[in-house]
Image (cartoon, rainbow, N blue to C red):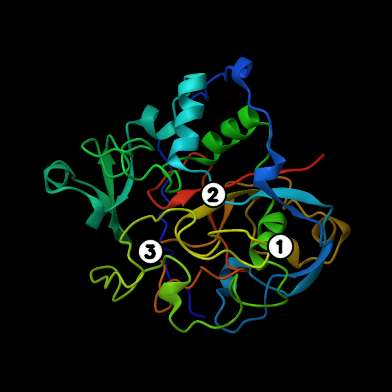
Amino acid sequence: MSEKKCCSPNDPHKSSSDINEINFSSKQKIKLGEMILIDQEKFLMGTNYKKAFSSDGEGPLREVILSKFYIDQYPVTNIDFEKFCISTGYTTEAEKFGWSFVFYQLISEKTKKNVSESVYDAPWWWKVNGASWKNPYGPDSSIKGIETHPVVHVSWNDVNAYSKWVGKKIPSEAEWEIASRGGLVNKNFSWGDDDSEIYKKCNIWDGKFPDQNSLDDGWLGTSPVDYFEPNKLNVYDTAGNVWEWCSDWFSSSFHQIDSKETRINPKGPPQGNTKTMKGGSYLCHNSYCNRYRNSARTQNSPDSSTGNLGFRLAYSD
């Protein structure tokens, strides 16, 4: 498939910031009963799909071996993240920098008057001062009424801090993908290959992007994490809604080498500049960015945050 700019902007914050020291006295107990055990061991990762983005390095289709692990049944929600911030006093990078990217149709008319910057090659992303996880559309918004939606405006660094507090880990790309596939073999989506009436199966863009959304799926922005049916492993929301951070440094070629490091519990390259993201978001559409498929992948810098980027966590002994 010809290369197209992804629906998530890749424009890191232009300054550095120290990550908070976390109050581990409030560290949480892991509740494995609220996670899904993945013990399949072998699966086919990647794709040879002709409409995949070759420059993203989705292929090749390859057998990967994983040790058993647990993964969150749902993405982490606003209410989950609020508990973390209240318990630890944590301040996200978006809050420190004072801004984050918001999709323009979600911004109030009042806030729009104060916006002067957008992303050059993705002008639907506006730089909004005061946007953060608790003010997702700008300073005059809040998470009231969307408590069970996935938290957004969280950087990879923020997610890493949360994972330490809750005693889990950020899943590797391989762990995320096997969970998303739900036991199905070489299928495009978490439910199979059928993309008819897709608005009933996941939260993506319905209409002509980026101006016209028919809202067939009921949502312009994020949706509750349990709104759509889970896959066959009972894992929810891995197609659309929000992109999800993975632990791997991003590379479009590292995994193409057939080696122990890329086929047995792969963790990506040892270093890099951007982190891997999976799952697509409410802004994806087949005509523009079909990255809500299992094998699809993209990248962003560890300090970046946007209104369509969240996470879930994993755990292993």
Please identify the residue farthest to the front as the structure is shown. 33
Q: Name the residue that disc number 3 marks.
A: 283
What amino acid does circle 1 point to?
Ile
Do the residues bearing badges 2 and 1 touch, measured as CB atoms within 8 Å? no
The residue at 55%/35% (across/down) is: 157
Judging depth in this view, the residue of 141 and 145 nearest the camera is: 145
Q: Can I make out residue 189 in this image?
A: yes
What amino acid does circle 3 point to?
Leu
Residue 153, by quadrant, is top left
Label 2 neighbourhood size at 10 Å, few (<14), some (14-19), many (20+)?
Answer: many
Judging depth in this view, the residue of 167 and 90 nearest the camera is: 167
Q: Name the residue that disc number 2 marks.
A: 75
Residue 49 in percent (x, y) is at: 62, 81
Residue 137 in percent (x, y) is at: 28, 45
Residue 178 numbered tag:
1
The label nearer to you, 1 versus 3, is 1
CA separation, marks 1 and 3?
23 Å
Give the secondary structure at mark 3: loop
Do the residues bearing badges 3 and 2 touch, measured as CB atoms within 8 Å? no
Give the secondary structure at mark 2: loop
Q: Can I make out residue 314 in this image?
A: no
Image vertical order of residue 21 relative to residue 168, above or below: above
Of pointers 3 and 2, the one earlier in the residue sequence = 2
The residue at 54%/83% (across/down) is: 194
The residue at 15%/41% (across/down) is: 114
Do the residues bearing badges 1 and 3 touch, measured as CB atoms within 8 Å? no
